[in-house]
Amino acid sequence: MTRTGRPREFDKGKTLERALELFWSRGYGATSIQDLVDALAVERGSLYGTFGDKRRFYLEAVRLYWQVYERRLTAALDTAPLLPVLREILTHPARTDELISEMGTPNGCLVGNTTAELVPHDSEATEIVARSYRGFTDIVADALHRAQAAGEVTDSARPEDQAQLLLYVVQGLSLVSRAGLDKKAALAAIDAAIDGLRA
Amino acid sequence: MTRTGRPREFDKGKTLERALELFWSRGYGATSIQDLVDALAVERGSLYGTFGDKRRFYLEAVRLYWQVYERRLTAALDTAPLLPVLREILTHPARTDELISEMGTPNGCLVGNTTAELVPHDSEATEIVARSYRGFTDIVADALHRAQAAGEVTDSARPEDQAQLLLYVVQGLSLVSRAGLDKKAALAAIDAAIDGLRA
DNA sequence: CGACTTCTTGACAGCTCGTTCAAGAAGTCG
DNA sequence: CGACTTCTTGAACGAGCTGTCAAGAAGTCG
């Protein structure tokens, strides 16, 4: 029996979501505990008591991010025709409306950012992002498989390989766009990729 | 006239190259001045006197990286047929043999790594990587233009758009591969991309 | 040789950061 | 109320970092 003590004064879930936004926009290393304390209105000791150290806190945020993204991706791709939706997803890689209020994504894809910053030297982070990538390709490959069967997508390549290629495209777009997004050029490139999938 | 004083005891160019390797493999933030001092066998004061502060040092290394890569890319793409070479470049994004002795690249593409770590909040870094990306797409678009004229590459999309897409693919591959490279899957995805360019 | 310039060395200041911890506050239960 | 548990607060610690600087070494030039 856990004898109940003083109740927590903040919402753990909401706090994790807000920390996710901060980590997302600034990255792991550039987000200090003090930044979190200021933004979350929760003191250091409480953060440590609730979430463990900074690294565990961050990894928990990444897990949440992927969890939400995976659910939205699965839902979005369960439709026909597939290619228009796929195009939309590529151009808005993380339209996770449930999580962030602003229209644009703070800074590309959090999984990609984590890869650049912590992988491969942090093995737990490596496992999380590897699983996320595998999840993405599995979901997309499933959808492409259906779309191939429906005659919408070319079967000149296996769905898994097409999905892997799309993963590269999303992550590349997300990364390169940080240096300044030429929307016209980006859209044209995405269209070229989508056209390459057409049957 | 500059009265000559005590001569420098280390080779500036070689030192920059070795610093590049270190920055490449560990990233900007994770490479401390002490790491550089140990690896380069040059004391702090000399580094500061020769290269300015850490940030300028790093940006100089990135400039060198791109300079070498650009030269090799231009040379490599000046050939026909284009697609086999393009495939090779995608799968070995930074085979800059002149710079590194080992076969594999220390850690993806340094320009991509810089993008993830310093862009957009560092404006000088942003300009460097943006110029590099533009250089890449210019060179590749030129080659694709020739290959389209030769009937090797499909003209269903503009060469610039195809080049932009290839930039995304290289950077995406470079990033995602940090989480563990499934060579079979990666090659198959690249092949799918190359096949999509075929006329 | 002596004046002058530049490079080398490594100690040091100053700062930021992650993490800990003791003291107190806010609950529950008997 | 009093014992017990858990959460809160914020000061303090120690580690690691970047950048500086004074003293000395190694050259050139007159």
Image (cartoon, coloured by chain):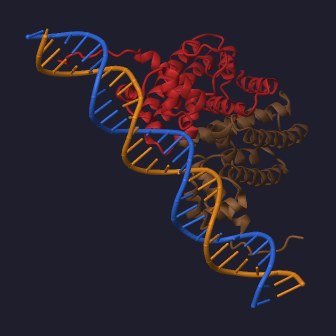
Chain colours: A brown, B red, C orange, D blue
Q: Residue C29 is drawn in which quadrant? A: bottom right
Q: Is residue B60 left or right of residue A11?
A: left
The answer to whether any part of residue A153 appears in the image is yes
Is residue A63 found left or right of C23 in the rendered image? right
Whether residue A182 is visible here, answered yes or no, is no
Instruction: Locate residue A11, reporting x and y percent.
Output: 71, 69
B125 lies left or right of A122: left
> Could you say which quadrant of the image residue D3 lies in?
bottom right
Residue A73 rendering spot, x and y as whole percentages: 79, 50
Instruction: Identify the image quadrant of the N terminus of chain A.
Output: bottom right
Q: What residue is at 61 percent from the left and 65 percent from the top?
A: A43
Total marks placed: 0
Whole-percent x and y of residue B163?
Answer: 60, 28
Looking at this view, is A93 or B199 the one in front?
A93
The correct choice, above or below, for A73 with respect to B85 in the image is below
Q: x, y percentage for residue B96? A: 58, 16
Q: Looking at the picture, does residue A76 appear above or below residue B151? A: below
Residue at 60%, 32% in the rendered image? B164
Q: Nearer the viewer, residue B80 or A41?
A: A41
Residue, x 60% and y 56% (percent of image)? A22
Q: In terms of depth relative to the viewer, which is nearer, B87 or B47? A: B47
Quarter of the rendering occupied by the C terminus of chain A? top right
Q: Is residue B143 left or right of residue A171?
A: left
